Image (cartoon, rainbow, N blue to C red):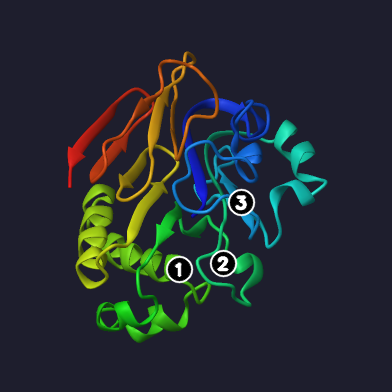
Amino acid sequence: MCRHVAYVGPAEPLGRFLVEPSHGLYRQSWAPRRQRYGTVNADGFGVGWYAEEDPVPARYRRAGPIWADLSFADLARVVRSTALLAAVRDATMPGADQEAAAAPFGTGAWLFSHNGAVRGWPGSLAVVSRTLPPEDLLSLEARNDSALVWALVLARLRGGDEEGRALAETVLEVAAAAPGSRLNLLLTNGDTITATAWGDTLWYLTTPGGGTVVASEPYGDDPQWQEVPDRTLLAASRTEVRLTAL
């Protein structure tokens, strides 16, 4: 369910990672090579990026498939950023939330995406959701499993947890409440990338220009791509990638 990618490093056009590669996110929307669940990611897409001297990222999201947006490739060609997070969506359940249900979700400096599905949603997380303040539940961007998972992560971040702990604890909590869930989470603050591999594919690449890419699958055939083992937490900067078993 879904494909996503994040990058931190020197400023590059968005299209360098999303459109130009032979198997970039644009192509993964209809022809993913390593997706284990689902075959077409046509239920929305989004990209978030950071402008110079502005810590709050911009987000561009749409409810339809990325290939149907005739302006996106042109936008991606000229917009440059030192960090981005983008996703194409294969919805777990159809809903009426339109582009609000498409990643990236975001608050403040953070951008977030969930590749996977919560087993037994929504009933499976009824107890977990009660740990959130009512205002957090009422302010969910969408009525889907990914939005609630983001709310759980965000509550931990606001409570003082660093990014890795927030993702890891959320994955373990949701997996305990809904066994069999697929919880590949992706988070950036514009300087670092944090991610989990839990039930689906995750890869990373250190670019020649001094950046790091983390993605559901490689967007090309560079042999430097490294696969992240399942049930692993990834923490990356522009120059370093650390893996920790979950």
Give the tally of numbered discs. 3
Q: Residue 30 at what x, y percent from top left?
A: 65, 45
Seen from the viewer's position, the closer of residues 75 and 29 is 29
Residue 197 lies, with reference to residue 114, above or below; the image says: above
Closer to viewer: mark 1 or mark 3: 3
Q: Quadrant of residue 177?
A: bottom left
Seen from the viewer's position, the closer of residues 5 and 9 is 5
Q: Which mark is residue 116?
A: none
State the SS at label 1: helix
Report which residue position mark 3 lands on.
40
Task: Tell me how far mark 3 sits from mark 2, CA to CA.
Answer: 17 Å
Residue 82 lies, with reference to residue 152, above or below; the image says: above
Q: Residue 84 at what x, y percent from top left?
A: 53, 40
Q: Residue furthest right?
A: 70
> Who comes first in sequence, dot 3 or dot 2?
3
Report which residue position mark 2 lands on.
101
Q: Residue at image x 18%, y 38%?
A: 244
Q: Residues within 10 Å of mark 2 (few under 14, many from 20)?
A: many
Q: Residue 196 at what x, y percent from top left?
A: 31, 47
Q: Quadrant of residue 103?
A: bottom right
**Looking at numbered disc 2 in the image, what kind of residue is underneath it?**
Ala
